[in-house]
Amino acid sequence: MAETVVTLDNFETEVLKAEELVLVDFWASSCGPCRLLAPIVSEIAEEYEGRVKVCKINVDEEPRLAMRYNVGSIPTLLLFRNGENIGASIGFKPKSELVRLVESAG
């Protein structure tokens, strides 16, 4: 399962109204740690297919979404369930820590 590109136009449908757990990756193409994290996020999308939706938001293209969730540093990963932010990871983290974040949400 590929990551879903999210914009202001589809954020509510793809993230807030999603029935499954949603992991949102706030990133930018100019961000080195974001580029290092990208393959890990892709692996999580594949490994948790059907259980976790993985979405990507480019903060350069969608600054209002970044501001709405107080994303001051990238990469930032936010975890949503039933439209509510239930967890976060800021900065580059190893896969094990991101898996722990997802698993802790059930």
Image (spheres, rainbow, N blue to C red):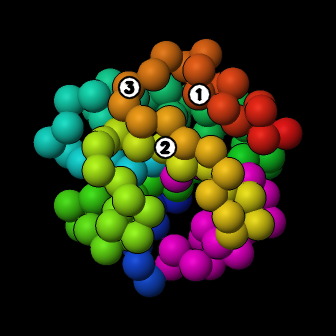
On screen, residue 95 versus residue 16, left or right, reads: left
Q: Circle 3 is placed at which residue position?
A: 92
Nearer to us in this view, 85 or 24:
85
Contact between labelled residues 2 and 1, with CB atoms less than 8 Å apart: yes
Q: Where does the magenta region start and end?
A: 10-24
Q: Quadrant of residue 47?
A: top right
Q: Is residue 89 left or right of residue 105?
A: left
Question: Where residue 16 sits in the image (x, y, percent)?
Answer: 64, 72
Q: Can you identify the residue that label 2 sits on?
A: 77
Q: Amino acid at mark 1?
A: Leu
**Image height of 83 relative to 74, above or below:** below
Provide the secondary structure element on which disc 1 rests.
Answer: helix
Of residues 77 and 9, the one nearer the viewer is: 77
Q: Is residue 36 visible?
A: yes
Q: CA distance from mark 3 to mark 2?
A: 10 Å
CB contact under 8 Å: marks 1 and 3 = no
N-terminal-most mark, 3 or 2: 2
Q: Amino acid at mark 2?
A: Leu
Q: CA distance from mark 1 to mark 2?
A: 9 Å
**Sequence order check, earlier mark of 1 and 2:** 2
